Each structure stands twice: as structure tokens, then as C-alpha cells.
Image (cartoon, rainbow, N blue to C red):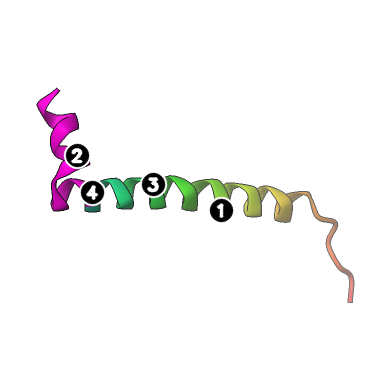
């Protein structure tokens, strides 16, 4: 429980939490973007 308290109350913990949330959000974004690109039909120019 002490780790959770430190994560949500200290500056270092909040910074770590922000990085964790950012990385999870970035992975969701890239996963969706890559999935969309893989399912596109190729453009013949």
C-alpha cells in the first residue's frame, strides 16, 4: 500500500504515473493506426 500512496502523492510518483498513462495511450494510438494502415488497399499510381 505504501507504493500506491507514493505513486499518487509525491512529485516523482505523479510524474511516473503521467509517463505510464502516456505510454499506454501512445500504444493504443499506434496500434489503431497500424491496424488501419494494414487493412487499407494499396494505391496503384
Q: Which mark is residue 4?
A: none
In the structure shown, which secondary structural element does the residue marked by tag 2 occupy? helix
Q: Is residue 18 above or below residue 8?
A: below
Mark 1 — residue? Answer: 30
| Quadrant of residue 1 within the rendered picture | top left
Cβ atoms at labels 2 and 4 below 8 Å apart: yes
CA distance separating discs 1 and 2: 26 Å
Identify which residue, 31 or 14, lies in the foreground: 14
What whole-number distance in Å separates the C-alpha atoms at marks 2 and 4? 6 Å
| 2 or 4: tag closer to the N-terminus | 2
Discs 3, 1 touching: Cβ within 8 Å: no
In whole angstroms, how far apart are the C-alphas of marks 4 and 1?
A: 24 Å
Decide whether residue 9 is among the magenta residues: yes
For the C terminus, which image quadrant? bottom right
Mark pair 2, 3: CA separation = 13 Å
Within the magenta stretch, is there residue 4?
Answer: yes
Q: Which mark is residue 7?
A: 2
Whole-angstrom CA distance, mark 3 to mark 1, is 14 Å
Question: What is the count of numbered marks?
Answer: 4
Q: Residue at x 81, y 55 (%)?
A: 40
Give, as a single range, the part of the protein colored magenta: 1-14
**Residue of label 3:** 21
Instruction: Characterize the local packing of mark 2: few (<14), some (14-19) or many (20 or more) Cα atoms within 10 angstroms.
Output: some
Q: Position of residue 13 (x, y in %)?
A: 18, 46
The local crowd at label 1, few if under 14, some if 14 to 19, many if 20 or more residues have their Cα within 10 Å, is few
Amino acid at each position: 500500500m505504501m507504493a500506491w500512496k507514493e505513486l499518487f502523492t509525491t512529485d516523482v510518483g505523479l510524474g511516473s504515473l503521467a509517463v505510464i498513462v502516456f505510454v499506454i495511450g501512445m500504444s493504443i494510438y499506434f496500434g489503431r493506426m497500424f491496424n488501419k494502415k494494414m487493412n487499407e488497399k494499396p494505391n496503384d499510381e
